[in-house]
Amino acid sequence: MQMTSRIRRWVETDTGHRVPNHNSKCRNMHGHRYRWEVELEGDVVSQAGASEEGMLMDFSDISMILEKYIHDIVDHAFIVYEEDSEAIDALSRIKGQKKLEVPFVPTAENLAKWAFEQVNPHIKTAYGNSIRLLAFHVRETPKSWACWAP
């Protein structure tokens, strides 16, 4: 009998951004300690003797995906909207500044969707169990979260 489960795993980054057209202080360059969290759903591995028996997916495999496709891209980087010429110009003056130009205003909501799209192709298992990325949660501050769930 297959057992449907949900699991979550997260990684944190220190990342900068700005919301250039916002009518508050968020239009200024600033940073956050972001939490990038996947939520997976599916059937646990039922293959007897398998390394992942009883698991939906090994947490360490999920961590490797989050490290490669999120953490290593945005940690200590500045995420900037590709049409924000002022921020792009300012960042280009800082030698070695790590940045990620994106085709959207980098709000938590848009970053949750972006992260989902980066990670989703890599969520799979070698055991044939049903698994899917249900949602991607982004915590911008301890009181502010956004979620993308298609």
Image (cartoon, grey):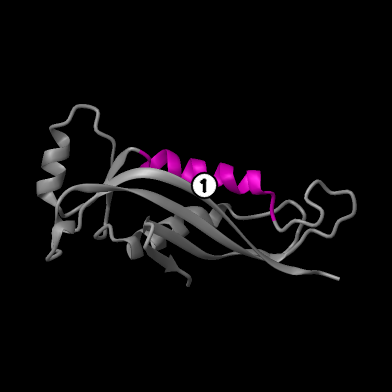
Toward the viewer: 18 or 83?
A: 18
Task: Using the rendered view, name the quadrant where residue 105 is placed.
Answer: bottom left
Task: Using the rendered view, name the quadrant where residue 43 is placed.
Answer: bottom right
Residue type marked 1: Leu
Toward the viewer: 65 or 8?
A: 8
Q: Position of residue 75 (x, y in %)?
A: 38, 40
In this image, 56 relative to 150: left or right? Answer: right
Toward the viewer: 23 or 61?
A: 23
Residue at screen point 78% across, 69% down: 3
Q: Position of residue 58 (x, y in %)?
A: 69, 49
Q: Please report the bounds of the magenta region as a residue range.
A: 57-75
From this viewpoint, is residue 100 visible?
no
Q: Is residue 94 above or below residue 46?
A: above
> Which residue sits furthest right?
48
> Which residue sits furthest front?
143
Task: Using the rendered view, name the quadrant where residue 54 is placed.
Answer: bottom right
In reply to whether residue 31 is colored magenta, the answer given is no
Secondary-structure class at tag 1 = helix
The residue wearing badge 1 is: 66
Residue at screen point 71% across, 58% down: 56
Residue at screen point 84% across, 60% down: 46
Residue at screen point 60% across, 55% down: 123
